[in-house]
Amino acid sequence: MRPLMLALLAAGLAGCSLAPTYRVPESVAPAAAFQEAPGWKQAQPADALARGQWWKVYGDDGLNALQDKISMGNQSLQAALARLQQARAQTQFAGANRYPTVEAKAGATRARTSVNSPGFKPGAEPVGNNYSLGLDLSYELDVFGRVRNQVSAAEAGEQASTADVATLELSLRAELASDYFSLRSDDAQQQLLDRTVEEYAKALQLTENLFKGGAAASIDVAQAQAQLETARTRAADLRLHRAQTEHAIAVLLGENPSSFKLAPQALADGVTPPAIDPGLPSALLERRPDVAAAERRVAAANASIGVAKAAYFPVFSLAAAFGYDSTQTGSWLQAPSRAWSVGPLAALTLFDGGRRRAQNEQAQAAYDEQVANYRNTVLAAYRDVEDSLAALRELERQSVSQAAAAAAAGRALEQSNYRYKGGVATYLEVSVSQNAALQAQLAASAIQLRRMQASVQLVKALGGGWQA
């Protein structure tokens, strides 16, 4: 008996694993360089000093202060951290199966034995007591790697949850930066519209004076009034958008929108995105936490195949018990009352109606699903970087042409005002020029915002702070 037990124990400690040998799934091969990167300004070493806290490359103290609050305040991030704690607990739970289970038992019963039962001795007292105290030990000998693969799957799932937290935090910080720049762009446009309203009000006053003097028609007054009210409407709509953006930032920080306030601070003219080096495409997969999460889920699914295959083989275990058993309390814990047992057990399912085959097919299909998800995540990573690089390049060109358009529209408006005051042009010409100048300035401000947000999206696409 003893040699058999030792052999089973050795087999359990050095058993085989039925999981396939894990390899990172093949995905689309990276190109030599990003397609949209040629001509893009490469970052200087100083631009990469704060890649851990990537938002600091924008040099905005207001943004830095908000980013410092998001880790503790955002409730979505807190929920993700709680899910990570669950995954860690699941790993500990699975790992506990590698060790024996020991249970302590104690009991005291009083029972009556049937006098007609085969085991009853004539003349014995049918009513009696029984006192028991002991330890039960059970240990599964992991001969075919079922327990080890369960632990491996749980560990890979925990690592995937860790990467999920990093992915969510990166997404939230990028959203906060994008909303912040949107808020500051609204402040800049609000200043522009407020100045426009003042200028339109002066133009209306001038037109009314000209009308009273007989130098302007009533239609000019109506057009000036329409221009003024339209500008006021746009200014009110912009204030609404700013308020909603401010509320969104408050929720991101876990604060009550009713008590959250950011003082207006316009995004300065001429502010451009910092230079960000996209690096090599081959390094992208090491930066992106969502790619890491997808790869870890493939590893977990691979280990689950080993768990499913182990169901076809016997389960070997070792059971032992030691304790005291007596009918009287006086002799309960004495040496003659000792009882013990020890021995190996083996269990094998002979027929289950195809349950194990279905579980194996399910595990293999789950693995195939995770491989496809991983490859899709890799493709999406390359697409995100290419999209952001293309957006930055084209928006930079748009900013140049739009600045020229705004300057030309300003000169046209100046000339129209001179012509109108000189009586050689109608107010319609002034109105058209005013609209064109305002639209050109607002478009330039919108392009500036899109450039800043595209820069944030590039950082996000590259994995944010991609320190090893």
Image (cartoon, rainbow, N blue to C red):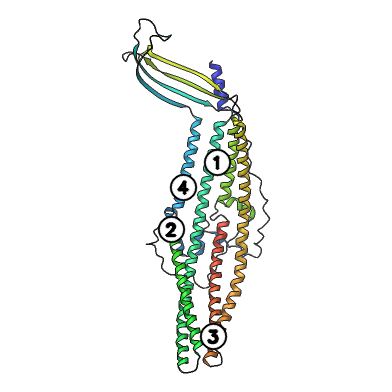
Q: In the rendered structure, are the residues bearing label 1 and label 4 in contact, judged by CB atoms less than 8 Å apart?
A: no
Q: What element carries label 1?
A: helix
Let me know if residue 46 appears in the view: no
The picture places residue 55, in percent across and down from the top left corner, at: 50, 60
Give the Cα separation between the discs numbered 2 and 4. 18 Å
Q: Which residue is drawn at 61% across and 54% down?
A: 380
Which circle's residue, 3 or 1, is located before the other in the chain?
1
What mark, if any, has residue 134 been given in the picture?
none
Residue 294 horizontal side relative to residue 319, left or right:
right
Give the Cα separation between the discs numbered 2 and 3. 44 Å
Q: What element carries label 3?
A: helix
What mark, if any, has residue 430 been given in the picture?
3
The residue labelled by disc 1 is 156
Which circle's residue, 4 or 3, is located before the other in the chain?
4
Give the Cα separation between the discs numbered 4 and 3. 59 Å
Question: Which quarter of the rendered picture does the N terminus lie within?
Answer: top right
The kind of residue tagged 1 is Ala
Give the Cα separation between the discs numbered 1 and 2. 32 Å
Q: In the rendered structure, are the residues bearing label 2 and label 4 in contact, judged by CB atoms less than 8 Å apart?
A: no
Give the Cα separation between the discs numbered 1 and 4. 16 Å
Of badges 2 and 4, the one in the foreground is 2
Of badges 3 and 1, the one in the foreground is 3
The residue labelled by disc 4 is 81
- In the foreground, 90 or 438: 438
Of badges 1 and 2, the one in the foreground is 2
The picture places residue 436, in percent across and down from the top left corner, at: 56, 79
**Eyeballing the image, is 132 above or below 449?**
above
The residue labelled by disc 2 is 251
- Could you classify mark 4 by the number of other residues whose Cα lies within 10 Å: few (under 14), some (14-19), or many (20 or more)? some
The kind of residue tagged 2 is Val
